[in-house]
Image (tube, rainbow, N blue to C red):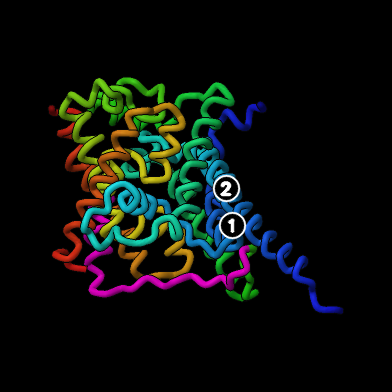
């Protein structure tokens, strides 16, 4: 093989830029697929969330349990195969720091209260706006304010 | 569109499909699946102020996720407008319990008596929407993730912090369901 000419190098680099843009489109398409799955599986429904917290149907537990099992098996396979991402990076999942654990217990409980009140976690909130439940826009705005207030109080909160 | 699309998908189809988004995002771009980071990206983009938590390059770290989120919204639109969607077929016990609390409209994805612009002016509408939304935003930011980031990505990677967070999700959800909703929906 001869060394690539300047023209060829430029070609490869412009390819890479196109590649990056292509990937952004892939994220959008994956998001669309996720929105469809959330809506048609009805996990976006306030009623389904109530059914779950009242332990009156196996459905949500079946969905969450089988989703975790599928994700865990896939992650284990990816790690074993030491796969590279299409973007070229080596796949590495950053570990979460435990610290005192307070942030997970307290933050988790606060989110749980909001989850049952709104009947939606962040993904479903957006699927519901697309679904036509337009008042969920107000939920999202409040959630953005809530996130902002956390960021502001962060130096004073136990983590 | 065929009938299977209009009916609610069984749990053993929906669950594994949802789980596959974790490896899909890893394989495409080494991205960790987590929706609530977008709330932080939105703060960073709109009003970072002098808050250190929001002073980072959200375009570099967040654009892929914000696009994913825009997709979720479009997907929700497609799913509900492509076909005639049936009312959510919840269990008879749940329906009876909610009727006792004063919920009568079961036709949508959420009860319209509580989740509509007009209901925002009622105490139960305001608390469900505005206070509930605030708690979702504050809690996910404090916990560093929501159902996708902790329950899915985190538990799939056997993270102890995520297990603590998920136990918190359920503790909070049960508390709201049994201690707050009876008064909020029924009493006020």
Q: Residue A63 — which label?
A: none
| Number of marks in picture | 2
Q: What's the magenta bit mostly, secondary-structure-wise?
A: loop
Magenta stretch holds residue A26: no
Q: Quadrant where the N terminus of chain B lies?
A: top right
> In whole angstroms, how far apart are the C-alphas of marks 1 and 2?
8 Å
Q: Which residues are magenta?
A: A87-111
Relative horizontal placement of residue B64, taking residue B167 as reference (left or right): right
Relative horizontal placement of residue B57, taking residue A1 as reference (left or right): left
Q: Quadrant where the C terminus of chain B lies?
A: top left
Residue at the image position 17 percent from the left and 25 percent from the top? B122
- Please determine whether, in this image, residue B69 is positioned above or below residue B98: below
Q: Secondary structure at mark 2?
A: helix
At which x and y percent is residue B64? 50, 53
At which x and y percent is residue B120? 22, 26
Q: Residue A30 — which label?
A: 2
Q: What residue occupies the far right of the structure in this picture?
A: A1
Q: Are marks 1 and 2 in contact (CB under 8 Å)?
A: yes
The answer to which of B105 and A131 lies nearer the viewer is A131
Q: Is residue B11 visible?
A: no
Task: Tell me the chain of label 2.
Answer: A
Residue at the image position 31 percent from the left and 65 percent from the top? B164
Residue that mark 1 sits on: B24
Residue at the image position 55 percent from the left and 31 percent from the top? B78
At which x and y percent is residue A58? 44, 45
């Amino acid at each position: 093989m001869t060394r690539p000419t300047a023209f060829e190098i430029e070609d490869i680099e412009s390819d890479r830029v196109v590649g990056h843009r292509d990937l952004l489109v892939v994220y959008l398409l994956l998001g669309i697929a996720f929105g469809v799955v959330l809506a048609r599986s009805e996990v976006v429904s306030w009623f389904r969330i109530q059914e779950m917290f009242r332990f009156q149907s196996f459905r949500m537990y079946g969905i969450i349990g089988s989703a975790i099992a599928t994700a865990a098996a896939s992650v284990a396979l990816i790690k074993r195969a030491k796969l590279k991402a299409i973007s070229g990076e080596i796949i590495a999942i950053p570990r979460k720091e435990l610290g005192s654990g307070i942030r997970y217990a307290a933050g988790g409980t606060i989110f749980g209260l909001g989850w049952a009140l709104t009947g939606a976690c962040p993904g479903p909130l957006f699927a519901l706006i697309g679904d036509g439940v337009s008042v969920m826009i107000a939920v999202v705005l409040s959630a953005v304010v809530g996130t902002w207030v956390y960021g502001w109080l962060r130096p004073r909160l136990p983590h | 569109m065929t009938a299977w699309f209009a009916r609610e998908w069984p749990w053993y189809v929906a669950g594994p499909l949802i789980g596959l988004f974790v490896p899909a995002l890893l394989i495409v771009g080494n991205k960790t699946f987590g929706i609530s980071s977008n709330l932080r990206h939105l703060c960073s983009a709109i009003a970072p102020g002098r808050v250190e938590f929001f002073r980072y390059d959200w375009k570099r770290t967040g654009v892929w996720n914000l696009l994913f989120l825009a997709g979720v919204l479009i997907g929700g639109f497609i799913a509900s407008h492509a076909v005639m969607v049936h009312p959510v077929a919840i269990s008879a016990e749940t329906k009876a319990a909610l009727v006792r609390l004063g919920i009568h409209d079961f036709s949508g994805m959420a009860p319209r008596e509580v989740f509509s612009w007009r209901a925002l002016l009622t105490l139960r509408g305001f608390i469900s929407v505005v206070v509930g939304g605030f708690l979702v935003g504050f809690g996910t930011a404090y916990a560093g993730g929501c159902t996708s980031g902790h329950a899915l990505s985190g538990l799939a990677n056997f993270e102890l912090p995520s297990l603590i967070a998920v136990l918190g999700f359920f503790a909070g959800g049960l508390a709201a369901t049994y201690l707050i909703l009876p008064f909020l929906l029924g009493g006020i």
